[in-house]
Image (cartoon, helix red, strand yellow):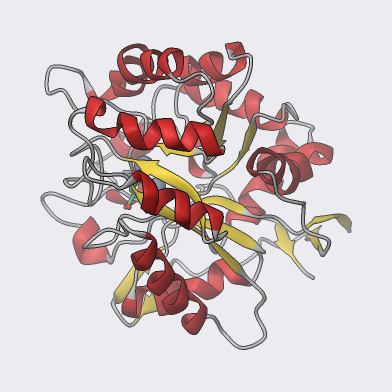
Amino acid sequence: MQSITIRRPDDWHLHLRDGAMLEGVIADTSRTFARAIIMPNLVPPVVTTADAKAYRERILKALPDGHRFQPLMTLYLTEHTSPDDVAEGAKSGLITAVKLYPAGATTNSHGGVRDMEKAIPVLERMAEIGLPLCVHGEVTTPEVDIFDREAVFIDTVLDPLRRRLPELKVTMEHVTTSDGIDYIKAAKSNLAGSITTHHLIINRNAILVGGIRPHYYCLPVAKRENHRLALRAAAVSGDKRFFLGTDSAPHVDPLKECACGCAGIYTSINTMSCLAHVFEEEGALDRLEAFASLNGPAWYGLSPNEERITLSKQAEPVDFPAKIETGAGPVTVFDPMFPLHWQVVA
Ligand SMILES: NC(=O)N[C@@H](CC(=O)O)C(=O)O
Ligand SMILES: [Zn+2]
Ligand SMILES: [Zn+2]
């Protein structure tokens, strides 16, 4: 039996939701991951340090007994966000990053930023104090094709912003294109990217071929195969600027399986099994630790976890549930469409 031991991983982009959903999903993360950056797109969103403090307490309360897990909180940037509140949240250690959602770009983003100009005072303060900005990097202009939204965002929003505020640390979240990968690689400093588990595995065919498959729909939407290959190459390269952000985003099945289904894929439960499979396929199992456990903390200025996890490869496929039951309803689990043989065993 083959096995590898790595430092305990962290998830640098996670949706835990709230209430019954939070209670239903948190163990799938806290069982394996030591820390996660918690996305603030609740309804209503987490916009102030006080909101983040209260949300953090709800997360810790939902944590199963015996699980050691640290939620790293973010604030949802609006055109009215107070620079002082952000700075205080950062200083107290409660806030790890601020999240930019262009208005209308994704789930619960209608309160996001329409006019970047209005966000500049906050962003200037963040640059001053070294607080990272996490971006959902897609434009929402109706004229732009949904498959081009990330590339156009880089040219029309991200690059101008980084030229204006070169000291601002930016995480390009859930990179889905070779354009994104190239842009990050070309940057001299202050830019990194998170990559999801599912974008290493699916391309857009998964959503559209043989019938429409809502459980493969997320935002940014999966792109062509050449983009998936670019993401894979970056993830397994060991390059410190790329790290895991699962973007595990649970929605109950009735909200996925309908005429206007929500965007989001639930991968918390089988992410490490999927990643071990991908890294083995790429002949890069020795770099899984960099991607899942080392590069993220280095970027966020934190120490890597001291604890270790072991993954082992077994002959029989590992059984993951097709869906999990939560108090909010059933949530379908990401199906990588190949059998998984790797499993976290300790
Ligand atoms: N990724 C998704 O498809 N959905 C996320 C939002 C996001 O990260 O864009 C969600 O909150 O459901
Ligand atoms: Zn997003
Ligand atoms: Zn997300």
The answer to whether residue 82 is left or right of residue 5 is left
| Residue 196 pos. (x, y %) | 52, 42
- Residue 220 seen anywhere in this rendered image of the structure: no
The quarter of the rendered structure image containing the N terminus is bottom right
The answer to whether residue 165 is left or right of residue 107 is right
- Give the tally of numbered discs: 0
283 or 78, which lies in front?
A: 78
| Residue 240 pos. (x, y %) | 71, 30
Q: Going 58% across and 25% down the picture, which residue do you hit?
A: 190
| Residue 326 pos. (x, y %) | 37, 78
330, above or below 341, in the image: below
Query: On the image, which quarter does residue 162 sit in?
Result: top left
252, above or below 291, in the image: below
149 or 187, which lies in front?
A: 187
- Residue 72 seen anywhere in this rendered image of the structure: yes
Query: On the image, which quarter does residue 103 sit in?
Result: top left
User: Which residue is farthest front?
Assistant: 84
The quarter of the rendered structure image containing the C terminus is bottom right
Q: Going 24% across and 42% down the picture, which residue do you hit?
A: 212
195 or 78, which lies in front?
A: 78
The answer to whether residue 336 is left or right of residue 140 is right
12, above or below 173, in the image: below
342, above or below 64, in the image: above
| Residue 199 pos. (x, y %) | 49, 37
